[in-house]
Amino acid sequence: MYHLAANPLNIQNNSFYYDTCGLNASPNSYIRLNKNRFMKDNIAVIFNNTFLSDTVSDNIFAYNLTAFYIEYAVGLISNNSIKHNSLVAKMKYCDTSLKFNNNCIDSNDYFVTLNQNIKNVNFRTNYWGVTDSSLIQNNIFDFHNDFVQGIVMFMPFLTQPTNDCQSVSLPDTTLSVSNVHHTNISITVSPNPFTNDFKLDCGTDHKISNIDIYSFEGRLIQSKSNVNKSTETIEMINYPAGVYIYKATLSNNSIVTGKLIKQ
């Protein structure tokens, strides 16, 4: 994980894979962020009162729980490929000083969530993977869901991907510091949605080693190690209703992630 100090810093041509946080910009830092790959991170990038001294462009943000967690930033985020994330951006204290424009935002579970963000934010002229404005709005949490929040201004939007919409494949495991790898093994979650608890079942051919549960913003809220069983029940009685993410590490060091809905 990069933790940036206050001096200007160029970050180019790096790979951030399987990190709790790929890049965490210190308050009042100045950065340039170009041609990097953020994949399978809990949170790809944290901007906290960050000043983007040049356009954040030509990066790939893919298969992360949250691509951007932003508590105020100034600058332009443009021409990036943002794909297959659980959440594209969670924003606090932001306004139109930060612009998300001309990005390829495709095949993500949810788009933008505003929290303590009373001002409008600029997400115009992006490609969202769909051409129906109601489908875009349904994956945004803003004034339309909570009147104390601002509005995510996403219109007009692109109806076709731009030339900068890069194809994305999962990272080569040899590049991962943790030496873990994604797998096609499926895990059954039941029930889902759930009320108090749920069961993970990976079948008879595998065993679950560790289970991590994250809030939708990417914060680790529960962890269970040394499971060594093919099924395991997780209790979440004391957690509020909402969307959560599970990460199960199997006995062959494979990782399976998925979405949970608590009613």
Image (cartoon, rainbow, N blue to C red):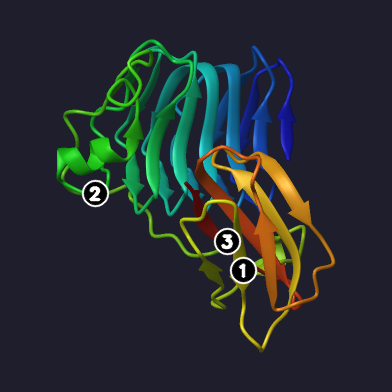
Q: Position of residue 102 (x, y in %)?
A: 29, 35
* Viewer-nearest of discs 3 and 2: 3
Name the residue carrying label 3: 257
Secondary structure beneath disc 3? strand
Q: Position of residue 241 (x, y in %)?
A: 51, 40
- Residue drawn where x is 19% and y is 28% of the image: 155
- Residue drawn where x is 66% and y is 40% of the image: 238
Give whichever of 98, 120 is nearer the camera.
Answer: 120
Name the residue carrying label 1: 200
Pick whichever of labels 3 and 2 is earlier in the sequence.
2
> Would you call the spot at circle 1 few (<14 residues within 10 Å), some (14-19), or many (20 or more)?
many
Do tag 1 and tag 2 residues touch (Cβ < 8 Å)? Answer: no
Marks 1 and 2 sit apart, C-alpha to C-alpha, by: 37 Å
* Viewer-nearest of discs 1 and 2: 1
Q: Amino acid at mark 1?
A: Leu
Q: Position of residue 65 (x, y in %)?
A: 55, 47
Give whichever of 102, 118 is nearer the camera.
Answer: 118
Name the residue carrying label 2: 161
Q: Is residue 6 left or right of residue 131?
A: right
Q: Amino acid at mark 3?
A: Thr
Secondary structure beneath disc 1? strand
Q: Amino acid at mark 2?
A: Pro
